[in-house]
Image: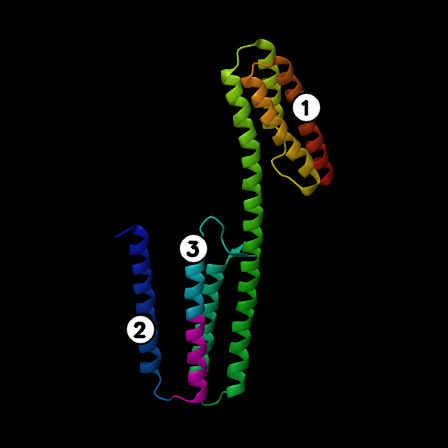
Amino acid sequence: MSNNKKNAVMLTLVYLVIFIAYNLLVFLVFNKFTAVFWISYGFMLTAYLVHIGCAVVATQNTSIRLLFFGIPLLSLSIFFTGAEFFCSFVFMLFQSVIAVKLAILLQGLLLCLFIVVGVIAVATKDAVEQIDSNIKQNVSFIKGLLVDVELLLEQGSATDIMMELKKLSETIKYSDPMTDKAVAVQEQMIMQDMIQLKRAFDDNDTVMVKDFCGRINLLFIERNKKLMILK
């Protein structure tokens, strides 16, 4: 059995034991079961299931955590479950004198508050994942070009070509890894010129290699300046 499956089984057992312990507590402590009791019991079970759901979602993607104002959603779900446990226990304790509407109102508001927090955290996570995906894609674009130029440097021998490729390598290395629609044309032209550069290099066409190195350098300078203006 893999570690992930073992951890899942252990976590399931822990949650099951906690659920059994809670039921033993409330049904042994209380011998009167009014509408307020069952309402509070229902809200507590709902809070517990919500917490388990948060735990499952939080463990599905460990690279990007669900956060609400910097606080992990899993931690907030624990606080919410604890608050609901205290609230429901108090209502059960004074079930004879507490109105049903008050029990529904307070515990319903607590549940709604946490749902709002959860929705915001999930929305924030989706936005962060999109940004992270874009950054990875942009970094891959720069790294791919840099690898292509460095491979040419390893194969080259002519001093003048090596100088041009080295200059191009430095330009790519220190270029802005971010991108924007405003520089899409420049990036497309860079990709096309890079293909032509590699062909010229393979054909030992020194003049064209220098020409394409210069063109790509200028395109990167133009791209970087536009990105700087947009920030």
Mark 2: amino acid: Ile
Disc number lying in front (2 or 1): 1
Identity of the residue furthest to the right in this view = 229
Give the extent of the magenta segment: 33-48
Residue topped by disc 1: 215
Q: Nearer the viewer, residue 122 or 78?
A: 122
Q: Nearer the viewer, residue 120 or 90?
A: 120
**Few, some or many residues within 10 Å of mark 1 (<14, 14–19, 20+):** some
Residue topped by disc 2: 20
Image coordinates of residue 100 in percent, x first then y, are: 50, 87
Q: Is residue 113 visible?
A: yes
Judged left or right of residue 35, residue 150 is right
Q: How is the image coloured?
A: rainbow
Q: Nearer the viewer, residue 25 or 207?
A: 207
Image coordinates of residue 54 in percent, x first then y, are: 45, 62
Mark 3: amino acid: Gln
- Report the disc number at residue 60: 3
Residue 43 lies in the magenta stretch: yes
Secondary structure at badge 3 equals helix
